Image (cartoon, helix red, strand yellow):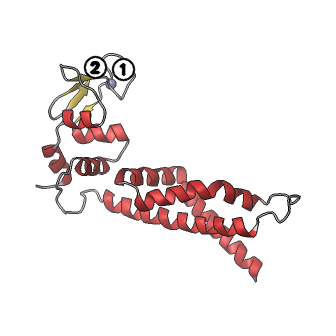
Amino acid sequence: MANIFEAVKAAVTVPVAAERYGLKANHAGMVCCPFHDDHKPSLKLNEDYFYCFGCGAGGDVVELTRRLFDLRPYEAASKLAVDFGVDVPATAPPDGSLNRFRSDLLRCQQVLDEYLNLLIRWQRRYAPRSPDDALDDRYVEACQMLEPMDYMASVLAAGTLEQRIRTVELLLADGKMDQLEERLNRIKEQERMEEN
Ligand SMILES: [Zn+2]
């Protein structure tokens, strides 16, 4: 078995994956197309490929999964392998995207961790001392961000592969991680100067 793509394609047919992922086929093997606004079934599920007569979407089982869950091709193949218990060859992914995912994941975890520590510190240090105190921006940010950031960190640590992939993509979108990392560095620098 040469690679994960061949392994999942050999093990999982298009109709089986489609059914598992919520597409209901009629007797003719047609489903309402999830890729365009489709009111009567125009997407045909064949054993090893699908094709939509409405919008022209088509491809194999990996492509179907990739489009349904908005994944990269290697991630879609990995999802199929996990969801259907396919034994995959223990070789490095051909395009290096699993390695990239791992390093993206690690980076997100490190930055989130640092941000969480900062928020916890801010929440303690800048909490109002009396009801009349004006709220410090840092305290407000800590109150607003601690819970969602903590949730993301726990998904990255213990979520399913799919949840982790999603969360990493969400965090990396639009340079969000870069900006947060830059900001954390600025804050660290500032705090160091204030302490001296
Ligand atoms: Zn379509």
In what element is the residue under mark 1? loop
Q: Mark 2 CB in 8 Å range of ligand 1?
A: yes
- Residue 59: x and y in percent read 23, 35
Work out which residue is located at the far bottom of the displayed protein and give it: 196
Name the residue at 20% across, 49% down: 5
The numbered mark at residue 42 is 2
The numbered mark at residue 38 is 1
Name the residue at 13% across, 55% down: 2
Image-quadrant location for residue 142: bottom right
Name the residue at 39% across, 53% down: 165
- Residue 116: x and y in percent read 59, 65
Rendered view: 104 above or below 9: below
Looking at the rendered image, the quarter that the C terminus falls into is bottom right
Q: Viewer-proximal residue, 138 or 191?
A: 138
Q: Mark 1 CB in 8 Å range of ligand 1?
A: yes
Ligand 1 in which quarter: top left
Amino acid at dot 1: Asp
Name the residue at 16% across, 55% down: 87
Rendered view: 19 above or below 82: above
Work out which residue is located at the far right of the displayed protein and give it: 132
Question: Is disc 2 surrounded by few (<14), some (14 to 19) or many (20+) residues within 10 Å?
Answer: some
* Image marks 1 and 2: residues in contact by CB distance under 8 Å: yes
Mark 1 and mark 2: span between their CA atoms? 7 Å
Work out which residue is located at the far front of the displayed protein and give it: 131
